Image (cartoon, rainbow, N blue to C red):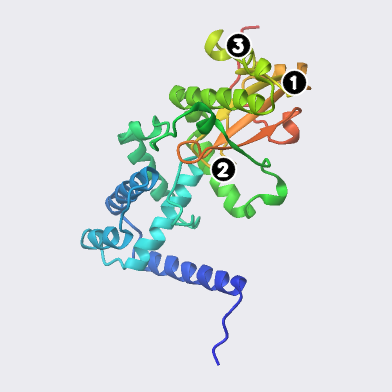
Amino acid sequence: MHRVGTREDRHHEVTRYQQRLSVAEMANEDWTDEENDLIVADYFAMLADDVLGNTYNKTEHRRRLLPHLRNRSEGSIEFKHQNISAALKALGEDWIPGYKPADNFQMALTGAVVRWLQNNPQWLNRVSDRPQADGMAETAKLWIGPAPTLSNQPPPQELEKTLRIAYKFDVAGRDERNRNLGRAGEERVFSHERTILGTAGREDLARQVRWVSEEDGDGAGYDIASFEADGRPRLIEVKTTNGWERTPFHISRNELAVSEERRTEWCLFRLWNFSREPKAFELRPPLDAHVSLTATSFQASFR
C-alpha cells in the first residue's frame, strides 16, 4: 500500500529533487550568458502579463525556449525560472508567484537580470500597471501587518545571499532615487491616513492631514503630518519598494534625528509589494531596535 507522505516529507522530496537537478545542470554545463539572457527575457514577458492580470501559458513559453538552449530539459527551465524569482527577490523586485524562489543559483543569472533591467528602465519606473478602482476610499485601504522579526526571517543562508545581492547592486539606493515610486507611495499613504480618520468619525482631522514633502519639500524629517484618532500628532516617513518586506532601504541622518527628537509622534511606514498589491508595516523609534543601521557614505571635511 502506497503511503502518502506528510507535507514536510513532500517538501524535503522536492528540495532533494531541486538539488539533484541543480547538480546535474552544473555537471552538464553552466548556462551561458546568452542562455541566461534568453530565459530572463522570457520570464519578464510572463511577469508583465502576470502583473497585468493577463492569461499566459507557462508550458508554451518553456517549449518555445527549448530550441534556443543547449540540451536543456523542460524541468531544468522550470527550475531556472525559480532561480530568476530568487534573483528578483534579492534585487527588491516583483516575481511570478507561481515560481517559488529557489536560491541556489549562480551570480551570472543575477547579472542577466540586472542587464535586462538596465535595458528596460521603464520597468523600474513603473508604479502600478493594474487598473485602480474608482473612488479614493476604495483605493486607499492598505493591508498593514507585523514588521519582519527574527522569528519570521528566512533560513540564514538564504537571507545572507539575498541581502548580499541587495547590497552589491544597491537596491536601497535604487528605490530611494526612484522619484515616481517614492511619490506614489507617499500619495497612497496620504490617502490612507485621511480614509482611516474619516472611517473613525474624525473628518475634522482628516481634512487637516498634510502631505508635507509635497507642499513644503524634503527636509522636515517626515513626509506626512497626520493624527491618531484621539487627535495626537502622527508624523510619517514613507519608504516604498516593489520588493518583498525585507528589502533594504535608505534613511537619512535628518530622518533619524527627527525620529529620536519626536519619538512618541514619529513612525516609519514601510510600503512593499507596491506595484502589485501594496502591503505595509510600521516601525517606531528607536529604529535600531528593528533594523541594522549601516553607514553607506561619509562627509569629508578638511582639518
30 and 173: which one is in front? Answer: 173
Please report the residue visible at 53 percent of the width from the left and 68 percent of the height from the top. Answer: 15
Q: Eyeballing the image, is 201 above or below 106?
A: above
Instruction: Report if the CB atoms under discs 2 and 1 are less than 8 Å apart.
Output: no
Q: Eyeballing the image, is 82 above or below 279?
A: below
First-in-chain label (2 vs 1): 2
Which secondary structure, mark 1?
A: loop
Amino acid type of the residue tagged 2 in the rendering: Leu
Q: Nearer the viewer, mark 2 or mark 1?
A: 1
Q: Residues within 10 Å of mark 1 (few under 14, many from 20)?
A: many
Please report the residue visible at 55 percent of the width from the left and 73 percent of the height from the top. Answer: 10
Question: What percent of the width, then of the height, locates residue 141?
Answer: 57, 34
Amino acid type of the residue tagged 1 in the rendering: Glu
Q: Quadrant location of the N terminus?
A: bottom right
31 and 56: which one is in front? Answer: 56
CA–CA distance in space, label 1 to label 3 = 17 Å
Q: Residues within 10 Å of mark 3 (few under 14, many from 20)?
A: few
Residue 300 vs residue 40: left or right?
Answer: right
